[in-house]
Amino acid sequence: MEELIYRDRRGTNCSKWNHYGNQFQHENLMGLWVADMDFAAAQCVRDALQRHVSFGVFGYDVTPESYYDAFVRWEKTYHNYDVARAWIRYSPGVVAAFNWFIQMMTVPGDAVLIQSPVYYPFANAVRENHRTLVESELVNTNGVYTIDFADFEQKIREHHVKVFLMCSPHNPVGRVWTRQELKRLLDICRENGVFVISDEIHQDFTFAGHVHIPAATVGSYDDMLVTLTAPSKTFNLAGLKNSVIIIPDDTIRKKYDDYVAVLHVASGNSFGVVAAEAAYRGGRAWLGQVLETVYGNYQLLVSSLRDTLPQVVVSPLEGTYLAWLDFGAYLRPEQLPDYIEGRCGLAMDYGAWFGGASACHVRMNLATCRENIAQAAKALADHL
Ligand SMILES: Cc1ncc(COP(=O)(O)O)c(C=O)c1O
């Protein structure tokens, strides 16, 4: 069986461990924030990249059909989504793509809805493109998050929402939306003429029997929905900047093609394509190791905190590799940074960044070695 290789990434230019920018007030923190993994990519990916490097010519290239075949097969095999080759487009990142779709499908001032708390580039994309941010907050019941459908519909009607930017599975609350939940959301969007951007970048991280359902497969929504996904989270390839945009509708696809024609970014760099194809073909066993490790880390975290800090609420990890912890029983929001960074020496994403009633939350990245999670759990217990 392929071994999962943990790498100490300190001193390697990675954002997670080294370059904190102005997000944190301390240095030399354990990197448990940004959503990438501390594991070397699958052997098949490293081999394919080695071959590419050995050949040594990195001129202009075209994306081979075999790349598309590999992705189509992956979606069919693991998500039961029949993606036609012709629907697939490139973007250098999922964040770039949802910004572009906001620009394509709305004009300044138009309302875009998100479900907070949610991955903070969602709100940034709305604000930075000068659209109106509308939030339908998820309902938190002792760490389990659900959708307030009445609020969702009311906000859409009240603000004449044009676009719903959906996160599925949901970062940071760890929900894997059910078919029923997705259908209800999409039917409300259909009735109100709302275009849906479905960010499914975490599609391959599901646990404990939860199954990711691509939004596009729950009904006939092709004329109002695009799906954004990528090998970047699944196979830890974020630095290679290769994402997959699925646009089943001809008119929307034409719009996208016209948009990227002006940007001159219709395809990416060859390393991203080589790595993605190799991963989709041969990376399943490696991903299996990752899933096992992540879930083991989650269980360790839950059991440690249950013993030491029983009032910390850890949301059930249905999907993603990100744990969502509520310290509200112990701390006020303004006390969090000193505790998390100053005393525990940890870099985690603060709940306040994600919007909603999350000021006492932190998000912990579980895609690291067991020792780091054990050390972090101990630090949290020792310093509160
Ligand atoms: C929901 C979600 N979308 C997008 C991204 C990042 O995508 P990319 O690196 O392809 O821009 C992340 C990374 O954490 C994410 O959680």
Image (cartoon, grey):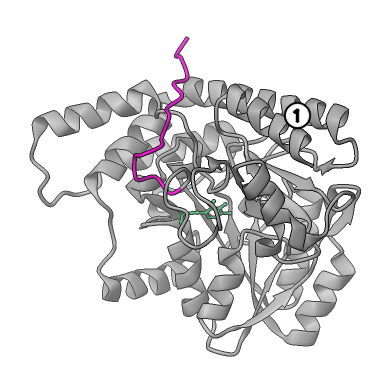
Where does residue 127 sit, x and y in percent of width and height? 57, 79
* Picture layout, residue 299 above or below residue 104: above
Classify residue 3 as left or right of residue 330.
left
Q: Residue at x 67, y 62 (%)?
A: 354
Residue at mark 1:
209
Classify residue 237 as left or right of residue 305.
left
Could you tell me which secondary element the residue under label 1 belongs to?
loop
Classify residue 62 as left or right of residue 297.
left
- Decide which of 86, 171 is in the foreground and name it: 171
Q: Residue furthest bottom?
A: 109
Residue type for callout 1: Gly
Where does residue 154 sit, x and y in percent of width and height? 84, 78
- Decide which of 96, 384 is in the foreground and name it: 384
Q: Residue at x 28, y 37 (%)?
A: 274
- Decide which of 169, 217 is in the foreground and name it: 169
* Picture layout, residue 14 above or below residue 295: below
* Picture layout, residue 85 above or below residue 110: above
Where does residue 233 sit, x and y in percent of width and height? 50, 42
Extent of the magenta region: 1-15
User: Could you tell me what secondary structure mostly forms the magenta stretch?
Assistant: loop
Where does residue 13 sit, x and y in percent of width and height? 34, 45
Quarter of the image where one finds residue 256: bottom left
Q: Is residue 3 magenta?
A: yes
Q: Residue at x 78, y 34 (%)?
A: 381
- Decide which of 249, 107 is in the foreground and name it: 107
Q: Residue furthest top?
A: 1
| Residue 128 in view in this figure | yes
* Picture layout, residue 174 above or below residue 299: below
